[in-house]
């Protein structure tokens, strides 16, 4: 074999959970310690060459649509590479789609968040049909007889692929179809019609412009019923074995997320059952969206973590100008800055996942309302920049597919687009502040818990208070406010729970307005120690 002089060894054969100190600490703090054995096992699997190869194979061999069989019958099926199915089997087998619903014990959402974080690092695309079943359950429970029928299979640990009547399957998956051609963010513009059939559900006619994972067994769909926009459960196969009138027009040719199929679909009198109240569809499906938004935060954190792991690993093996990159002061600064961002994101993600575990605590529920919108906006934006910078740490190798960084880079913007694009989330923050002031109170109370721990943080807090108390909060400056809220909550969490060197670097850099690129941390910080905390050792 040719020598690989001055090239890093592949980052494989390590445990992604064990190597992630901020994640391990947060799992304990948020009450998920009981899941550590599972997390350790999953972390080990995620680091194997075999699992890493599945991620590459599933993206190099994207799904293919088969609209018809050889006799000309419409079948609307999508074929996936076997690697996709292996990824799905592991995810479903570990309950990443259902842990809190199967084991409703304290810390279950936090444990599930950690597991999703670890396993998504192998491959991000299959996270979509893992996230949607997790998110569908709270919406489904608004129609108890449907929940009784579907939930046992929806939360099963069996990955049972293929279009068959649900009652004959060991496990089922759900997707969602909201977005239409004429409007995604503005769901009120939906035109798909739902006509009631006497005592037996509805027939839906219309289209959806985006419908991911169309091989799922059922979808939550928004459509206009006589009483207004309503939420429906639409199975792909009817109980008598016939295919529902759910037709896949084509698969989207996407920037990234290539292992996952995203389709355009048409409903031609497709049968569906209503969930929740007629005319209250947005409210019903928002139960689902709240959970998928959490997964966008987790997905962004996992992209950052994987990028930081790759960058810190590569630079510890690559020499330039006679020294390891990890010893070059300016590279150390870049790596440390990325590690700071990654840790701040992990802490925020786990804090919010913990709030999902405490829904009956009014302060936690109020905190979650605002924190989720803030975090969805901010962490998804930061992941894009962080992954790009980590990619550059590998030089030319980072631009080459085999390094995994191009895949992470293509995946990163997606979390910011779906489940409420950036502006929509930023405006949602303003809406929550205006209409649910208790959410802002809870959020501020949480930030204030960091008061007195760092003078730079305290000064920023004073400025934030002034800004929030001012009457001139406008739509146009929503992003400014959300950024300040995000940095304040991350600072507070880091000061209380993070590594002290990282909290110090965060306060020194994020509150003084300096440096808009990564690698602009000031002097006097313990940068090498920060990098070492985040470097996986193999
Ligand atoms: C790969 C992929 C998979 C997807 N899968 C699904 C799926 O399975 N099911 C599903 O239902 N949808 C899915 N979507 C659709 C996705 O949720 C929408 O694309 C998203 O919600 C944005 O809607 P839109 O594309 O109609 O953009 P628009 O609503 O037209 O928004 C365009 C831009 O304008 C901004 N904007 C909107 N309103 C305002 C405002 N008032 N002020 C300022 N700015 C504003 C938005 O933030 C956005 O940046 C998927 C999308 C992608 C890319």
Image (cartoon, rainbow, N blue to C red):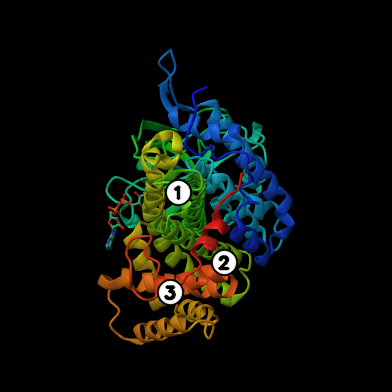
Residue wearing tag 2: 351
Give the CA distance from mark 1 to mark 2. Answer: 39 Å
Q: Is residue 163 visible?
A: no
- The reply to whether the residue tagged 1 has its Cβ within 8 angstroms of ligand 1 is no
Q: Given contact means CB atoms under 8 Å apart, are the residues at marks 1 and 2 in contact?
A: no
Give the CA distance from mark 3 to mark 1. Answer: 28 Å
Indicate which label's residue lies in the foreground, 1 or 2.
1
Coordinates of residue 178 in the picture (x, y in percent):
40, 49
Above or below residue 92? Residue 478 is: below
Coordinates of residue 183 in the picture (x, y in percent):
29, 51
Q: Kindly state the secondary structure of the residue where label 3 is placed.
A: helix
Residue found at x 42% / y 85%: 459
Indicate which label's residue lies in the foreground, 3 or 1.
1
Give the mark, 3 or 2, whose residue is nearer the N terminus. 2
Q: Quadrant of residue 355?
A: bottom right
Q: Which mark is residue 508?
A: 3
Residue wearing tag 1: 323
Coordinates of residue 14 in the picture (x, y in percent):
63, 43
Coordinates of residue 195 in the picture (x, y in percent):
41, 45
Q: Kindly state the secondary structure of the residue where label 1 is placed.
A: strand
Above or below residue 224? Residue 362 is: below
Give the mark, 3 or 1, whose residue is nearer the N terminus. 1
Give the CA distance from mark 3 to mark 2. Answer: 23 Å
Indicate which label's residue lies in the foreground, 3 or 2.
3
Q: Residues within 10 Å of mark 1 (few under 14, many from 20)?
A: few
């Amino acid at each position: 074999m040719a020598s690989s002089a001055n090239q890093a060894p592949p980052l494989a054969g390590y445990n992604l959970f064990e190597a992630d100190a901020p994640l391990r600490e947060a799992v304990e703090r948020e009450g998920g310690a009981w899941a550590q054995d599972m997390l350790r096992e999953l972390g080990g699997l995620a680091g194997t060459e075999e699992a890493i190869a599945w991620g590459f194979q599933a993206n190099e061999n994207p799904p293919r649509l088969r609209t018809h069989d050889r006799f000309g019958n419409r079948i609307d099926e999508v074929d996936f590479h076997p690697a996709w199915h292996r990824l799905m089997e592991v995810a479903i087998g570990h309950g990443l789609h259902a842990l809190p619903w199967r084991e409703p014990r304290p810390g279950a959402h936090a444990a599930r968040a950690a597991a999703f974080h670890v396993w998504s690092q192998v491959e991000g695309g299959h996270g979509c049909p893992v996230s949607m079943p997790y998110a569908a359950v709270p919406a489904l429970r608004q129609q108890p007889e449907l929940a009784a029928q579907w939930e046992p299979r929806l939360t099963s640990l069996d990955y049972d692929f293929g279009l068959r009547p649900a009652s004959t399957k060991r496990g089922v998956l759900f997707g969602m179809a909201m977005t239409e051609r004429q409007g995604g963010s503005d769901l009120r513009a939906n035109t798909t019609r739902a006509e009631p059939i006497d005592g037996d559900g509805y027939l839906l006619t219309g289209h959806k412009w985006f419908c991911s994972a169309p091989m799922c067994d059922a979808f939550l769909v928004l459509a206009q019923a006589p009483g207004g926009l309503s939420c429906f459960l639409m199975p792909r196969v009817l109980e008598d074995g016939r295919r529902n009138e759910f037709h896949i027009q084509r698969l989207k040719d996407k920037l990234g997320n290539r292992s996952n199929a995203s389709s355009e679909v048409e409903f031609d009198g497709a049968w569906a059952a209503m969930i929740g109240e007629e005319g209250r569809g947005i409210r019903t499906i928002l139960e689902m969206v709240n959970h998928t938004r959490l997964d966008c935060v987790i997905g962004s954190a996992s992209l950052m973590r994987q990028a930081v792991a790759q960058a810190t690993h590569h630079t510890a093996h690559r020499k330039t100008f006679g020294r390891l990159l990890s010893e070059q002061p300016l590279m150390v600064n870049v790596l440390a800055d990325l590690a700071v961002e990654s840790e701040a994101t992990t802490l925020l993600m786990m804090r919010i996942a913990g709030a999902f575990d405490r829904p009956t605590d009014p302060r936690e529920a109020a905190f979650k309302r605002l924190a989720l919108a803030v975090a969805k906006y901010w962490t998804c934006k930061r992941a894009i920049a962080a992954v790009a910078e980590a990619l550059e740490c590998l030089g030319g190798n980072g631009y080459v597919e085999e390094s995994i960084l191009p895949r992470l880079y293509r995946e990163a913007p997606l979390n910011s687009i779906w489940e409420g694009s950036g502006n929509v989330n930023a405006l949602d923050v303003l809406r929550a502040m205006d209409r649910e002031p208790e959410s802002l109170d809870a959020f501020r109370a949480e930030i204030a818990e960091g008061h007195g721990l760092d003078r730079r943080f305290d000064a920023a807090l004073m400025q934030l208070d002034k800004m929030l108390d001012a009457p001139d909060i406008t739509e146009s400056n929503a992003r400014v406010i959300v950024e300040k809220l995000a940095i304040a909550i991350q600072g507070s969490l880091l000061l209380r729970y993070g590594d002290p060197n990282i909290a110090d670097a965060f306060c020194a850099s994020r509150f003084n307005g300096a440096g808009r690129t990564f690698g602009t941390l000031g002097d006097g910080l313990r940068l090498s120690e920060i990098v070492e905390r985040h470097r996986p050792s193999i």
